[in-house]
């Protein structure tokens, strides 16, 4: 008998809601981190714009890269990991036509869930200052287009609003309600400022709700259990692997520069690394098929 098809993000988050548990979704900033996420045993993972452009291009998430550059990162990361992936679609990179193109292009790549936000381009990371949002009617139309024109009804569409930072929480809640009516499968109100705001958000909607507790960001850092109790269905930890990787690389380079070389044995063992990147599989193929010249 053939293997059963892999689970979708929709199936995974629906099961988490049914089980009344918080789904924890780590972020992958490159193919290697995606392999590690799968190796450790997570159910799914997230590819965000901030880590994608930071790790690949060394620039901040302030609208410097478009769909072509970011989708190239997504493609390469997905090629290294078989888990269902949740991808940041930014604002869809334009009007309703561009949103549909973005959603369908990601679907054809195999993306399982997509986030569409209501920021005005050039957008920026949700915990940065200087954000602007488009009129509610335009954002609502983008969500309606994305949900109506997705190729696969299993594709999970998340609507994100950044209106909390631009206006206030009431406006963010109003927008979120309209996005749900437009067809969004989940809601993400970016960067609430207090536990009281998290409580309001957590009990306000019937669809799954996402939060992103970011160290150094605007939102209070609570435990996963506390977020679950407040009514959230999923915590996306999109930057954790990137921040730790950047700090570790900086530390080892400073050690090398100092001439102490005290950290040379702190990294992953060479044999463990070879196993992680699938060296034995490729070596086996080489031995079985390469001609003996």
Image: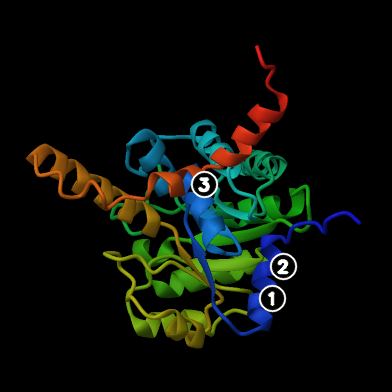
Q: Foreground: 71 or 131?
A: 71
Which secondary structure lies at badge 1?
helix
| Quarter placement of the N terminus | bottom right
Q: Position of residue 74 (x, y in %)?
A: 55, 41
Pick out the residue farthest to the right: 1
Q: Is residue 29 visible?
A: no
Q: What is the C-alpha distance between the residues marked 3 and 1?
A: 32 Å
Residue furthest toward the bottom? 229
> Nearest the camera: 87 or 242?
242
User: Which residue is depicted at the point 62% across and 44% down?
Assistant: 99
Taking depth in this image into account, of 86 and 282 the one nearest to the observer is 282
State the residue position of label 1.
15
Secondary structure state at the residue bearing disc 2: helix
User: Where does label 2 land, which residue?
Assistant: 11
Q: Which residue is mark 3?
A: 275
Residue found 52% across the figure and 46% down from its top: 275
Foreground mark, 3 or 2, reads: 3
Picture quarter containing residue 280?
A: top right
Could you tell me if residue 187 is visible in this image? yes
């Amino acid at each position: 008998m053939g293997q059963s098809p892999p689970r979708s993000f929709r199936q995974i988050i629906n099961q988490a809601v049914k089980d009344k548990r918080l789904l924890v979704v780590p972020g992958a900033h490159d193919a290697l981190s995606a392999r590690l996420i799968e190796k450790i045993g997570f159910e799914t993972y997230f590819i965000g714009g901030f880590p994608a452009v930071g790790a690949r291009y060394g620039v901040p998430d302030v609208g410097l890269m478009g769909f072509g550059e970011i989708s190239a990162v997504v493609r390469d990361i997905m090629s290294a990991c078989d888990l269902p992936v949740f991808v940041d679609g930014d604002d869809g990179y334009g009007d309703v036509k561009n949103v549909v193109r973005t959603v369908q292009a990601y679907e054809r790549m195999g993306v399982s869930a997509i986030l569409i936000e209501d920021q005005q381009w050039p957008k920026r990371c949700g915990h940065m200052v200087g954000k602007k949002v488009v009129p509610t009617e335009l954002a609502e139309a983008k969500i309606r287009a994305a949900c109506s024109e997705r190729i696969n009804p299993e594709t999970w569409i998340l609507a994100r609003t950044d209106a909390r930072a631009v206006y206030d929480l009431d406006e963010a809640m109003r927008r979120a309600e309209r996005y749900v009516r437009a067809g969004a499968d989940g809601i993400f109100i970016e960067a609430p400022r207090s536990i009281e705001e998290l409580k309001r958000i957590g009990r306000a909607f019937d669809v799954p709700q996402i939060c992103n507790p970011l160290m150094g960001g605007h939102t209070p850092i609570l435990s996963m259990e506390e977020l679950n109790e407040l009514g959230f269905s999923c915590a996306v930890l999109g930057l954790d692997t990137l921040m730790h990787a950047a700090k570790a690389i900086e530390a080892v380079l400073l050690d090398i520069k100092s001439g102490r070389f005290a950290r040379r044995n702190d990294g992953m063992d060479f044999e463990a690394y070879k196993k992680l990147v699938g060296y034995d599989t490729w070596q086996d193929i080489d031995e079985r098929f390469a001609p003996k010249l």
